[in-house]
Amino acid sequence: MTTAETSENGQEAASGRQAKIVALVVAVSFFMQILDGTIVTTSLPQMAASFGVQPVSMSIGITVYMLTMAAFIPLSGWLGDRFGARRIFLMSIAVFTGASLFCGLSGSLAEFVLWRAVQGAGSALMTPVGRIIVLKNARKSELVQAIALITWPALTAPVIGPVLGGFITTYASWHWNFLINIPIGILGIALVLRFVPEQRETNPGRLDLLGFVLSAAGLTFLLAALELSVKWDGGLLPVISMLAAGIVLSVMATRHFLAVDNPLLDLSAFRIQTFSMSTLSAGTACRMAINATPFLLPLLFQLGFGLSSIAAGAYLLVYFLGNFSMKAVTTPLLRFFGFRTVLGVNGLIAALSIAACGFLSPETPPFFIHALLFLAGLSRSMEFTALNTLAFADIGPAQRSSASTLSSMLQQVSMLLGVAVAAAVLNIGSALRGADNPVLADFRWAFVVVGAIGVVSSLRFLQLPAEAGAEVSGHRKFQKS
């Protein structure tokens, strides 16, 4: 090996280490953000008692967080380009961490809602800007591992959040569900300052204010309609009205972005098949199915099986273990089979394992339940990582900011859409029986419907070219000699 080759290999190894370190730093902040969104739900009754209000009133804290986040997500890419992704990422962590402190110290519902709104604004910038940082620091050959690292919090936090939240609320107090973010946030800030380099676009252009207003309002109304549909409260008219407003505003925003010279969001990324399929069409349907599962499983075990929250949490930890175990083989599987085969075949396995959960019962042997949950966790992890990596496989440097923002917006929609579909099936089943709570048969239909959506989306991925994303996956069959 020549000196030049040795030097080049050393530079590649250093670049790979730097990309992994940056991705790990970003993942720490993502974990804090996603954990917060799931951990709080377990402590709402205790918080309501502390504030002297009815438990149902506490839902506004979740709603205002989600809507504030929806309003600011479209702005994230431009802010990162204008002021530097590292600076905006630091600011988002600081805002989120500071708001977490004041949420934990809140003495009334009004105070809590105010700081949850601030928390949502910080959260809105964190995910898309953090992903931009990872994309700018990783070569295409390093993208699978980097995306896998920042995808891990999205897979694990929703599973362990309710378990951890229940433990903290039971043995400490609800305040610590927010105060736990303080050391994580401080650690995240220190790691970003130490390891993440500054990168800024030379000419980001002026802010497209009209595009921001239209896109923010459209996304906010869409997510509000989906959130309201999950609660099954207030009838269909508010849901339909908000959904219609969200669709109209989103169409107006799209027409605006296509007409102006310097749009807030560059929609040209949707002309790239790998991005559009993994985020907009099949990707949205696939994420719907996968995101509905962490919502359905705890309800199945507690309402359908009659288990305690701790016993249900033990089953969820097996699901988490499946998510975690797949990480070691994600890159080799993508290199051997390629994105098309993985997304298609693994997607079918994920969808069928989701549907199979609907046929579990209290009489099912625990070993079989554990095996099924582990398989569902494995396939969920593989599918998420493949989707998130393929989305940026063919995205050019000029499209990164908009593509990351668009991906975050669509992921928020797919997450709530999956929960909304699952909740609608459960609510319809309960309504037909004239009951307040779903029974085991209702869960069976919910899992089957969600699994069917996953099956259809998986078959859609088989239409990808066999060489799709080969430069990123390293799929050996299509590597140039």
Image (cartoon, helix red, strand yellow):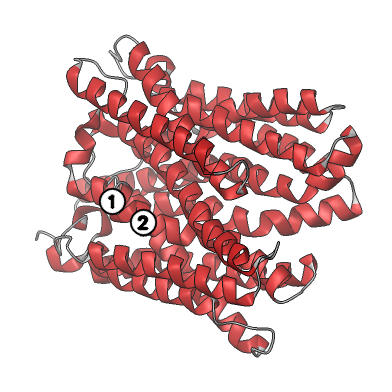
Residue 210 vs residue 443, the one in the foreground: 443
Q: Which residue is drawn at 43% across and 56% down?
A: 288
Image quadrant occupied by the N terminus = bottom left
The answer to whether residue 78 is visible is no
**Distance of label 1 from label 2 (alpha carbons):** 7 Å
Residue 365 vs residue 193, the one in the foreground: 365
Residue 68, percent from left and from top = 56, 27
Q: Do labels 1 and 2 touch, CB within 8 Å?
A: yes
Residue 133, percent from left and from top = 41, 34
Q: Residue at x 43, y 34 (%)?
A: 128
Query: Are there few (<14), some (14-19), or many (20+) residues within 10 Å of tag 1?
Result: some
Residue 156, percent from left and from top = 58, 57
Residue 308, percent from left and from top = 80, 69
Q: Which residue is drawn at 57% across and 22% down?
A: 91
Name the image quarter holding residue 108. top right
Residue on which the image places disc 2 = 285
Whether 210 is drawn above or below 91: the answer is above
